[in-house]
Image (cartoon, coloured by chain):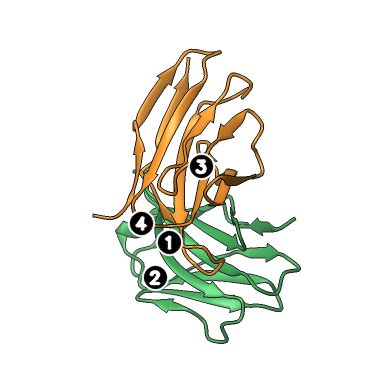
Amino acid sequence: AQKITQTQPGMFVQEKEAVTLDCTYDTSDQSYGLFWYKQPSSGEMIFLIYQGSYDEQNATEGRYSLNFQKARKSANLVISASQLGDSAMYFCAWSDDKIIFGKGTRLHILP
Amino acid sequence: DGGITQSPKYLFRKEGQNVTLSCEQNLNHDAMYWYRQDPGQGLRLIYYSQIVNDFQKGDIAEGYSVSREKKESFPLTVTSAQKNPTAFYLCASRTSGRMNEQFFGPGTRLTVL
């Protein structure tokens, strides 16, 4: 069965610093998608970034980038120049016909 | 405006009662999903449906049931067989295809007293 692992339950980062949130996955599939979502305290799920298994370039969306290392089965999220509003839970997800989520990392941005 | 609606936002039920959570989308998405989230935890897949009149169990389907009679609707029933039903329930949908992002509803917080 597919498995998503986020090893950092919580992180504290100073405002304006870059932060890397780790995500590894376990699959024998060749075709799959990887996603990152943000969940503020309000509970809504906000899509951040996507990476396809066949994409050769790392995905970027504004301050978010995805460090995709296929051989290592890792898909780390990098947030550049963190802001106070980045404080939230962050979930990595793996997709074929269904989408499986990791347990999340709670990110705290310190002023 | 296109989106996913879940109602109600908060729901209270007595132990032993079945309860149905609604999920409606007007995004013309084929696939719909139900997740459960416990405090401080990730999302766990309960059921998903890729087409009308068909659905599959996720990782924690026991004690839950679903139907998909219309493309727009995917209601979830929490039965009395679910031993610990108090949780935050999220519905999502997406266009078919593993490379497509999910869109989420605002969630329903169910409390069983």
Give the Cα distance between marks 2 and 1.
Answer: 7 Å
Tell us which disc is closer to us: 4 or 3: 3
Q: According to the rendering, which colour does chain A have?
A: green
Percent across and percent down for residue B73 are: 42, 43
Above or below, B19 relative to A74: above
Residue type at mark 4?
Leu
Q: Is label 3 or label 1 in front?
A: 3
The color chain B is rendered in: orange
Whether callout 3 and callout 1 share a subunit is answered no
| Residue position marked by numbered label 2 in the rendering | A17
Q: Badge 1 sits on which subunit?
A: A
Task: Identify the secondary structure beneath mark 1.
Answer: strand
Chain of the residue that carries numbered disc 3 in the rendered image: B
Q: Circle 4 — which element?
A: loop
Are the residues under badges 4 and 3 in a single subunit? yes
Q: Amino acid at mark 3?
A: Arg
Distance between the Cα atoms at labels 4 and 2? 37 Å
Which comes sooner in the sequence, label 4 or label 3?
4
The Cα–Cα distance between marks 1 and 4, rounded to whole angstroms, is 37 Å
| Residue A100 relative to residue B90: left or right | right
The kind of residue on which mark 1 rests is Val
Left/right of residue A33 with respect to residue A63 in the rendered view:
right
- Do badges 4 and 2 share one subunit? no
Report the residue at 45% width, 53% height from top.
Answer: B93
Is disc 2 in the same subunit as disc 1? yes
